[in-house]
Image (cartoon, rainbow, N blue to C red):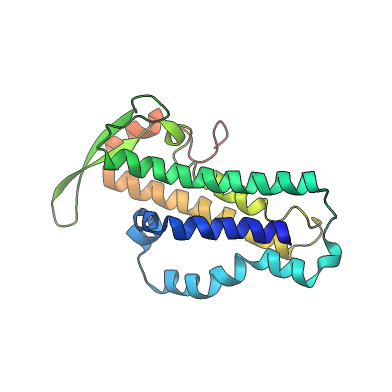
Amino acid sequence: AMISAAAQWVYLLKFFLWETGYFNTMDIQVDRAGFYICWGCLVWVPAVYTSPCHFFAARYDVAKNLSPATAAFILFCACLMIWMNYDCDKQKQDFRKSGGKNNVWGQPPKFIRATYQTEKGEKRTSLLLCSGWWGIARHFHYVPEILASFFWVPPVQVSFFIPWFYVIFLTILLFDRAFRDELRCQGKYGKFYEDYCKLVPFRVIPLLF
């Protein structure tokens, strides 16, 4: 329970320290603050995201006894995944903020300058990053987020479904979001996004999908 709680504490700390970074996420930019987001943040997220900890607290007898080294390794992996997810988003935002002028992983970035038209008929330009984390897969940032949730649960046996529900739910949610974002970007950028897909052929998981 302490491992799961500590990992979730780090996850929450990252959120509050980088709260303004979420203004550019799909939740805010596309889904907006309707019932879907408001009910989810006020009801679903507090209940489901913390469900592994609730399960451990109620059924501590089923948790595996881990050695200090194993516990530290699991917590380290969880923190590493949380950092990777943060760094993916920050990398894109820093890149766009600099107008594509800053280096990505010590190298000049590869990117596509995509022009598009808004609903009001205004022509605008967006930079599609093809380097760093965003050169591995088009939605690679979902991988460390899913893995972070996975590392909240290892102390419990796989025979219990409840603590694993969040991992399963999040995986379905993020893969669905990846597909929705693909459709949105295809409609928004057209041939520019087709060129982007040729440079970054994998959607989420490198070499697999």
Percent of width and height locating residue 187? 30, 47
Residue drawn at point x = 28 percent, y = 34 percent? 100
Q: Is residue 136 visible?
A: yes
Residue drawn at point x = 57 percent, y = 34 percent? 208
Quadrant, the N terminus: bottom right
Residue toward you, 197 or 72: 72
Percent of width and height locating residue 60? 82, 66
In the displayed orientation, state which residue is furthest to the top.
107
Q: Is residue 167 visible?
A: no
Locate residue 65 relative to residue 79 in the image: left or right: right
Residue drawn at point x = 37 percent, y = 72 percent? 34
Residue drawn at point x = 34 percent, y = 50 percent? 184
Locate residue 79 relative to residue 62 in the image: left or right: left
Where, by quadrant of the figure, is residue 209 drawn? top right
When the figure is inspected, residue 156 is found, relative to residue 93, above or below; the finding is below
Locate residue 120 relative to residue 191 in the image: left or right: left
Residue toward you, 202 or 153: 153
